[in-house]
Amino acid sequence: MGFFATKVLPEFIEVDLGHKSLQIRLKRNSRAKRYILRIPPGDPTPVITVPARGNLKTAQDFANRQVDWLKQRLGSRPDSIKFEEHARIPIRGVLHTLRSSGKLRGLAQLEMEEETEEPLLLLPGETQSFHRKTKDFLRKLAKDDIEGHVRHFTKQLGRNYHSITLRDTKSRWGSCSHDGKLSFSWRLVMAPPDILEYVAAHEVAHLVKLDHSPEFWRICEELAPHTKQAQRWLKEHGSQLHLYGQE
């Protein structure tokens, strides 16, 4: 292996977009065969995947050639939506407006505005704490919903699971380890309920078949007959869930 393959890369490089400079994160991947530029969902910083034998100069040259593409993609990208008062966020597929409950203490609650019938998420305390309290509420709601489906599906299959963990992953919605540890993105609770249900079924099916063989898909569709529709929804709309709650 040559010198450049082992040389440590800087975390970021910069390109000139004309009106401003843009940082690009470098990420070496030993399995990559070429340089790849992508913009992760919900993350404003582009990433260049650098192959094992790649080097800094080639990565910089590659980035410079992609300036027009970056301008186009970043210019058309929707803004992220913060968890702050009056923001509208999806909860179980329905847009809710974040409002202060007017109380210093208490629990976050889902309610309906009487006059307008507008769905609300009412949060106690100071507005400066909205981000943390909204995220805490969504994580708890996600865990409740996911655990309910996992218990139902594992009982249906006669299988046991070890644990359920919630994460904020950008590359996958769920995972299942060989020892039955299940992991899910808490952002699934913002999707329509049948989408979260499908991902729960998908990971529980892995308790039987830890692959994506025809037998696995048969089990998955037995648990969630809407598997194909849910996959299509995630492909078309899943990245939008990462736009919410970015600090």
Image (cartoon, rainbow, N blue to C red):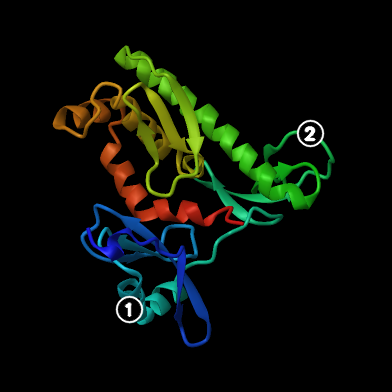
Q: Residue 61 bears which disc, if any?
A: 1
Q: Residue 152 bears which disc, if any?
A: none
For residue 49, what is the image quadrant? bottom left
Residue at disc 2, secondary structure: loop
Report the residue at 81% width, 48% height from top.
126
Q: Position of residue 84 (x, y in %)?
A: 68, 55
Residue at disc 1, secondary structure: helix
Disc 2 marks which residue? 106
Q: The residue under label 1 is which amino acid type?
A: Asp
Q: Residue furthest front?
A: 3
Residue 150 visible from this viewpoint? yes
Report the residue at 43% width, 66% height from top.
46
In front of the other: 241 or 13: 13
Q: Position of residue 145 (x, y in %)?
A: 50, 29
Q: Earlier in the sequence, mark 1 or mark 2?
A: 1
Report the residue at 82% width, 36% height from top.
105
Compared across the picture, whether 117 is left or right of 93 comes to: right
Residue 112 visible from this viewpoint? no
Nearer to us: label 1 or label 2: 1
Compared across the picture, whether 177 is left or right of 93 comes to: left
Q: Position of residue 195 (x, y in %)?
A: 39, 39
